[in-house]
Amino acid sequence: MTYEEFLLDLVTKDNRFIVMTSENRAAMRNITSQIKDNFIDTGITEQTQVGMAAGLALRGRIPIVHALATFITMRSFEFIRTDVGIACLPVKIVGAVPGFLSDGNGPTHQAIEDVSIMRGIPNVNVFAPADNDDMLKGLPEVFSSPSPFYVRFNNCKPVVEHSEFKIGRAETFGNGTDIAILVYGFLFAEAYKAKEILEAKGKSVRLINLRTVKPADEETILKAVEECRLIATVEDHFLTGGLYTILAEILLRNKKTADVIPFALKDKWFKPGLLNYVLEYEGFTAEQISNAIIEKLNS
Amino acid sequence: MTKEKSHSLEQTALKVREHIINMSTNGGCFIGASLSWTDLCVYLYKEFLNVREDNLKDDCRDYLFLSKGHTVPALYGTFTELGWLKKERLANHLRTNDFIYWHPNVNIPGIEFHSGSLGHNLSVASGVAMDCKLKKQSNKITVVVGDGELNEGSNWEAVLVASAYKLDNLLIIVDRNRFQANIQTEDLIPLSPLDEKFKSFGCSVKSIDGHRFEEIEAALSSFPFEKGKVSVLIADTVRGKGLPSIEKRADRWFANFTAGEIEKLLEELHSEYNK
């Protein structure tokens, strides 16, 4: 199933859903005529789109807002915080090409602080699916939840079939104790391959796909901290405010510490180019991740 | 408009102004711009909007969004006169035992949405107007904006979109008191010709004296001003209206008076009214 087919089915079955966009129709291009009474394109106006979504939600609708992840989270940040967050309205904010997925655009289009700023808004939750399968398994619950949600849109081909989804529950692969890799979003595929490489080299690994970054699955993370020698956080996001920070908050709250190796963008935007070049250049391929982990384990 | 109706509206506006003055102590409030849209506020709730205490949750009701949220004392004063808000609660202004503070919030019955950050409620109201259109309902959606507030680009973005979707159930009222917070609008970022600006954005525009009930009524009785267009009512008003000692004074945007000063202002209000 595609995201488009999912939306069509959702809107057909439940008239409360309104599909919106700021003239970014990539995710619903082929269904606009079939959902025309539930479709609003506001033009290139991210703040107005979010403000209108709040108004629609006041009338009992569930607006699903679409724009590029950078613009919807930053241009309309105050509208999300003030009109959606304060009122806790069930507006669903879908950010396209987050993180490395905006590979060739350059820094204007790099949403690599989106998780940080969205999770910082009270009431707003964050879903960062690993791939298309993960996304479509999560969206029914995310879209029908009474909470506002930010979704890091990701329709990449899955490398594995995902398990049943529950908000606030991570998905764990393996129960190794040398290394736990915490990951969300698109880099799941690299982390999954890194796990295979590490295992081929005799390391025991567990891979934790966060799914909802907020609420984060504190129990699963703490269990990994208890049981594993090393924790890796892997995210196409600034080091500040994302998964590494979430882990630090959890550790401090529970009076714990851990050996942690973070894979994140350390206070810089990434070098633009085609995705495979970007991953290589920035050090996020499965090989680079697994090599760095082995080096750390051996140090 | 009959003399009786006009007298009744004036009497209510006088009482609302008393409430506003009484709120401008013990921490104070944004008195100047609250007084400038008081007459509009009274007319809207008593005559124009289909909003009553018993239909506040009804999806057929009319909506009013106060985008210039700092002028909420006029709303609270009006709600008090309509009997929705107990007068004693106004004494809780800025106390943490209630929700009556400098900006509107939905804990007060009759407030549709919070505001305070300028340039937000026009897009929120457009969303409500859009939903009413989609559901083929005939609710009127009113947004009150300040003229200084129109510096914010988000307003113009929202007008562009509302016009594109032909939201003729949307009424934008501009409280044109010609003041920003601390300075006259035309001295800082001039807005004139404001009517031409809205017309060029596809709106149907009327301009009136925002303190004359017969002019307010004449304009609003023809809402929507044109089929298929957003209606914009530019209401020329005076900041601090009703109190000559503070009218049009840049330093009376916000005021926190002593009890003695409040007494004098109330006397001034009545002597001005009886002129």
Image (cartoon, rainbow, N blue to C red):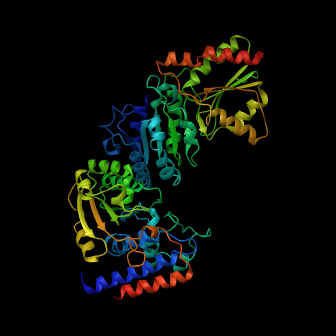
Confirm whether residue B110 shows in the render.
Answer: no
As drawn, is A10 to the left or to the right of B234? Answer: right
State the residue in front, A94 or B2. B2
B10 lies above or below B215: below
Q: Position of residue B98 (x, y in %)?
A: 58, 69
Q: Which residue is depicted at the point 42% across and 62% down? A: B68
Q: Is residue A176 left or right of residue A54?
A: right
Q: Is residue A88 above or below residue B253?
A: above
Q: Say whether residue B173 is left or right of residue B58.
A: left
Observer-nearest of A207 and A117: A117
Q: Position of residue B160 (x, y in %)?
A: 30, 48
For the N terminus of chain A, which image quadrant? top left
Q: Which residue is the extreme one toward the left?
A: B226
Q: Quadrant of the C terminus of chain A?
A: top right
From the top left corner, tell me how far across and down residue B257 is, in percent. 53, 76
Task: Judge from the rendering whether residue B8 lies leftward or rightward of residue A96; answer left or right.
Answer: left
Number of on-image labels: 0
